[in-house]
Image (tube, rainbow, N blue to C red):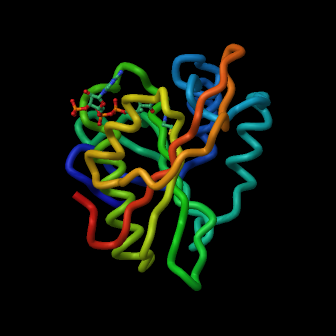
């Protein structure tokens, strides 16, 4: 268990598959996420049950609210490269009632601190769709800096959007 101020991070359990599947079928949650093919509930259940244990190359944690114990989202550090200590980060909160209360900011701080302190990462990177203002605000709040732009890298409802590439170096977490 990895504890932040408002949330804690824990391993996913097979029983969490139903929540994950529900989030992945909510258009508001998935609006700015890369998801073009949806999975069945059975596939989601088997996916979690068969998932390899967390390790340096792929760490997936459930985000749980300390105050009420509810599961509200996930964070993932993936594709870590030991030679340069770099990994990519994904975050999302599937429980919309919990948006706007600082939980994603705390989850980001907590997983980044874990990445730098426990995994000895030097760099954490991510990409975000330019129109995802809330996510960009969260990333900027914890210290991520814009590094570049991927032109027309995301398509939603017939419209193209750029993706912004962001990075956070060891020692720059705020
Ligand atoms: C984006 C997301 C992670 C934010 O989670 P959250 O818990 O609501 O975030 P926080 O409450 O910690 O912070 C949100 C910040 O964005 C700001 N914000 C919210 N909507 C905004 C908007 N439309 N424009 C600008 N800022 C906005 C809030 O005011 C807050 O900033 P503040 O603390 O300076 O006031 C969450 O809404 C989510 O998971 N969405 C769906 C999946 C997703 O888009 N994931 C990111 C993929 S890259």
Which of 127/35 is in front?
Answer: 127
Residue 127 location, x and y as percent?
53, 47
Residue 151 location, x and y as percent?
63, 39
**Res 18 quadrant in image:** top right
Q: Is residue 80 above or below residue 159?
A: below
Q: Is residue 165 above or below residue 73?
A: below
The residue positioned 34% from the left and 48% from the top of the image is 107
Q: Quadrant of ligand 1?
A: top left
Quadrant housing the C terminus: bottom left
The residue positioned 39% from the left and 29% from the top of the image is 133
The residue positioned 29% from the left and 55% from the top of the image is 143
Which of 64/74 is in front?
Answer: 74
Residue 89 location, x and y as percent?
51, 55
Q: Is residue 100 above or below residue 117?
A: above
The residue positioned 57% from the left and 48% from the top of the image is 13
Which of 168/39 is in front?
Answer: 168
- The answer to whether residue 49 is left or right of residue 122 is right
Quadrant housing the N terminus: bottom left
- The answer to whether residue 71 is left or right of residue 60 is left
Instruction: Kindly give the residue lying farthest to the top in the view shown.
Output: 157
**Res 45 quadrant in image:** top right
Instruction: Kindly give the residue lying farthest to the bottom in the view shown.
Output: 83
Q: Is residue 85 above or below residue 75?
A: below
């Amino acid at each position: 268990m990895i504890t932040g101020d408002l949330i804690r991070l824990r391993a996913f359990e097979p029983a969490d598959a139903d929540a994950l599947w529900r989030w992945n079928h909510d258009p508001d949650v998935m609006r700015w996420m890369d998801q073009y093919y949806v999975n069945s509930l059975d596939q989601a259940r088997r996916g979690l049950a068969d998932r390899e244990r967390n390790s340096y190359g792929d760490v997936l944690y459930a985000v749980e609210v300390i105050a009420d114990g509810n599961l509200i989202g996930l964070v993932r550090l993936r594709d870590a490269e030991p030679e340069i200590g770099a990994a990519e980060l994904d975050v999302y909160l599937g429980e919309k009632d919990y948006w706007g209360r600082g939980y994603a900011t705390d989850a980001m701080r907590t997983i980044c601190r874990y990445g730098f302190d426990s995994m000895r990462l030097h760099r954490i990177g991510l990409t975000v769709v330019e129109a995802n203002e809330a996510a960009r605000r969260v990333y900027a709040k914890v210290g991520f800096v814009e590094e570049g732009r991927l032109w027309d890298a995301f398509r939603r409802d017939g419209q193209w959007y750029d993706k912004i590439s962001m990075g956070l170096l060891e020692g720059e977490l705020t």
